[in-house]
Structures are given as structure tokens and as C-alpha cells.
Image: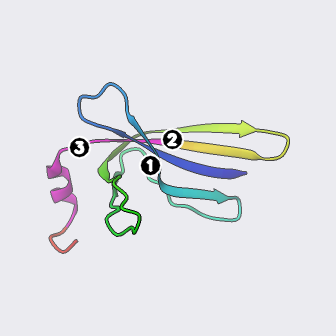
Amino acid sequence: MKYRVDFLFLPKDAARPQDEGEVVPIEVDEKNYALIPNVGDCFSVDASALQDNATVEFSGRVRTRYFHYLRTSDYDTCIVNIVVEEVDTGVWASLLSSDA
């Protein structure tokens, strides 16, 4: 089985998340291991070091994870949609030391 992870950002007071797609291109199969955030985990994407001028940067807390399984005659795939909700900046100050 192959796995793909897609992140969706939910701004404060928004009714639906924005589909950010492959923010962090995670694609693994049963031979690999990938650490993906769980509900309640704090999450941050910083794309400033990329050469392609990536503009997708956000942070927040994982609100939900949705697992969608696709079965075909050739292969099986699990697509994991992770909704990251925006949180107040004070949350980050309480989690990180001044050296981070």
C-alpha cells in the first residue's frame, strides 16, 4: 500500500479549510516510515529555505485527520488529509524555548 499526506489549513473563523495540497510532499509505501502529526499536535511549515520561492507557510494545531483508502486492481493507496487549524501566537511561545 502507498500513502500520501495532504495538509489543509483552517484559518480562524473560517467555515472550511483551504486546500494547500502537497505542502510537505510525503509519499511512502509499506517499506518506509513517515512521522505524521496526530490530532492535537502543533504543526509548522517553513518553506523559506526552498529555492523555488515557495510561499506556503503556516502553523497551527492538528484538528482532524481523514484517511481515504483507494483500491484498484494494480495497487492500494491511502490518502491522509490533515486539517491544521490556526492558533494564537501565544501557543508557540509556551511551547518553544527562546533558542528555537
Identify the residue under disc 1: 38
Which residue is the extreme one toward the bottom? 99
The amino acid type found where label 2 is placed reads: Asn
- Classify mark 1: residues with Cα within 10 Å, few (<14), some (14-19) or many (20+): some
Q: Position of residue 84 (x, y in %)?
A: 36, 43
Q: Secondary structure at mark 2?
A: strand
Quadrant in the picture for residue 11: top left
Q: Earlier in the sequence, mark 1 or mark 2?
A: 1
Q: CA distance from mark 1 to mark 2?
A: 11 Å
- Classify mark 2: residues with Cα within 10 Å, few (<14), some (14-19) or many (20+): some
Is residue 48 left or right of 69 when viewed as pictured?
left
- Which residue is nearer to you in this view: 93 or 10? 10
- Classify mark 3: residues with Cα within 10 Å, few (<14), some (14-19) or many (20+): some
Identify the residue under disc 3: 87
From the image, state whether disc 1 or disc 2 is nearer to you. 2
Q: Earlier in the sequence, mark 1 or mark 3?
A: 1
User: What range is drawn magenta here?
Assistant: 81-96
The residue positioned 80% from the left and 39% from the top of the image is: 72
Q: Which mark is residue 15?
A: none
Q: CA distance from mark 3 to mark 2?
A: 19 Å
Query: Can residue 82 be found in the magenta stretch?
Result: yes
Identify the residue under disc 2: 81
Residue 36's place in the image compared with 17, above or below, is below
Q: Secondary structure at mark 1?
A: loop
Is residue 64 left or right of 15 when viewed as pictured?
right
Q: CA distance from mark 1 to mark 3?
A: 16 Å
Is residue 92 left or right of 20 when viewed as pictured?
left
Q: Secondary structure at mark 3?
A: loop
